[in-house]
Image: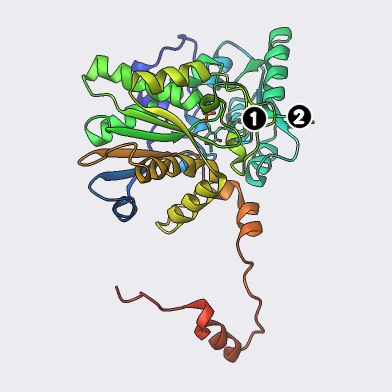
């Protein structure tokens, strides 16, 4: 358990007003998990780590930015916060607003938010409103309403969200001793990729650390940054990144270009395959979170990148528990047995179940 949250830990590097309060749930300090077997399968010859951001207090990376955005809003006396969200921002805003004693309103696209995120937002006591429209529609609405009323906008258009979120880059450098050679991550509204690039550049100034090349990955059906134009009706199984007009799109493209990286798109099938593959490492992430690694696998298989001797960090942004319905709908339901030993033996020893294969390795 972290002793401090990201605001206290990295206060000296955060460009925030003096009135900013420390509203924390001890977010950050997430595990950086080596996955050598997966690296081997992807061709080998490089070091691969998963930065498991699903281990933050509300189950996603959003907590890093939210602690700072809510802390700033609370510090200047804001009584309410609002955001549009595909789910994780909503749950995070709701939790930190609750901690600050503020009211929270979240707008989500109807029917397109994973159960664990919606449940979180409700549990933390936010007013949850579903929009008969997309995330992009919801974002346009919250921007407008925050201009008319004294309610703090905590989407990543809020600069303090990025200030907090960039601490993930600091943690990578602090932990690895330098920046990784490559960073891969999913891209939706493009706040996270923008924040990582800010963080790495800042650390280069103050710590003389290096810069990674950044591989940003979108889902094929929601890939405005790859297509070069907005997508009016984005679709993907990775609902977290079902975004057609990324608010920080320009900055994301700049981060990819300046870092000599790229932004690519992968299919939903590739995302789900990587989600399953990560689970075989004991790392269960929500679909969007597997997109970064799916993009890495895609680039490697086409020999578009050469990772020999390199160090790669993959950001897995949200926990698998966020989206349990997806597993229920795409995987077979557990068998129901009578409470009898014979039935249990049958089930375990039946050929289909392959119960003890490979156990002795
Ligand atoms: C698991 O919660 O946009 O590119 O409203 O939940 O910084 O937007 C979520 C985005 C990646 C993309 N992975 O990050 C929201 C929202 C997960 C996410 C992204 C999101 P950005």
Can you give x and y, in whole percent of width and height, for residue 157 in the image? 56, 16
Which residue, given by chain and number where applicable, does mark 2 sit on? 133
- Residue 224 place in picture, x, y as percent: 57, 26
Q: Is residue 275 left or right of residue 237?
A: left
Q: Which mark is residue 50?
A: none
Question: What residue is disc 1 on?
Answer: 85
For ligand 1, tell me if the residue under mark 1 lies within 8 Å: yes
Where in the image, quadrant-wise, is ligand 1 located?
top right
Secondary element under disc 1, as helix, strand or loop, is loop
Q: Quadrant of the N terminus?
A: top left
Q: Residue at x 32, y 18 (%)?
A: 201
Which residue is at 65% across, 53% downward? Answer: 325
Q: Is residue 21 visible?
A: no
Residue 351 location in percent, x, y? 51, 83
Other-residue count near label 1 (Cα within 10 Å), few / some / many at <14 / 14–19 / ≥20: many
| Residue at point 31%, 33% (across, down) | 182
Q: Nearer the viewer, residue 147 or 259?
A: 259
**Residue drawn at 50 percent across, 16 percent down:** 250
């Amino acid at each position: 358990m972290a002793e401090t949250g990201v605001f206290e830990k990295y206060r000296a590097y955060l460009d925030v007003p003096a009135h900013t309060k420390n509203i924390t749930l001890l977010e950050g300090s997430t595990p950086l998990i080596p996955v050598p077997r997966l690296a081997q399968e992807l061709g080998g010859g490089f070091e691969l780590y998963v930065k498991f951001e699903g281990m933050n207090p509300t189950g996603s990376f959003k907590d890093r930015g939210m602690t700072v955005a809510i802390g700033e809003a609370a510090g200047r006396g804001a009584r309410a916060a609002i955001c549009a969200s595909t789910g994780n921002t909503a749950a995070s805003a709701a939790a930190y607003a609750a901690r600050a004693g503020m009211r929270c309103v979240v707008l989500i696209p109807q029917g397109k938010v994973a159960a664990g995120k919606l449940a979180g937002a409700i549990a933390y006591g936010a007013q949850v409103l579903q929009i008969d429209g997309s995330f992009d529609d919801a974002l346009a609405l919250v921007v407008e309403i925050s201009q008319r009323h004294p309610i703090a906008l905590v989407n990543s258009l809020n600069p303090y969200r990025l200030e907090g979120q960039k601490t993930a880059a600091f943690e990578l450098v602090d932990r690895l001793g330098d920046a990784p050679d490559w960073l891969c991550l999913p891209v939706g509204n493009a706040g996270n990729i923008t924040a990582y690039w800010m963080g790495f550049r800042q650390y280069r100034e103050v710590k003389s650390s290096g810069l990674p090349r950044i591989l940003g990955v979108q889902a094929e059906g929601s890939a405005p940054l790859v297509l070069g134009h907005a997508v009016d009706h984005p679709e993907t199984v990775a609902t977290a990144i079902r975004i057609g007009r990324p608010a920080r799109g320009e900055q994301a493209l700049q981060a990819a270009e300046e870092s000599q990286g790229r932004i690519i798109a992968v299919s939903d099938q590739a995302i789900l395959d990587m989600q399953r593959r990560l689970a075989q490492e004991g790392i269960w992430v929500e679909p969007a979170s597997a997109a970064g690694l799916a993009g890495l696998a895609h680039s490697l298989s086409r020999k578009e990148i050469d990772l020999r001797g390199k160090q790669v960090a993959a950001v897995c942004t949200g926990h698998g528990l966020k989206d349990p319905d997806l597993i229920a709908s795409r995987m077979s339901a557990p068998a129901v047995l009578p409470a009898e030993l014979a039935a249990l033996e049958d089930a375990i020893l039946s050929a289909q179940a392959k119960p003890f294969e490979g156990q002795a390795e």
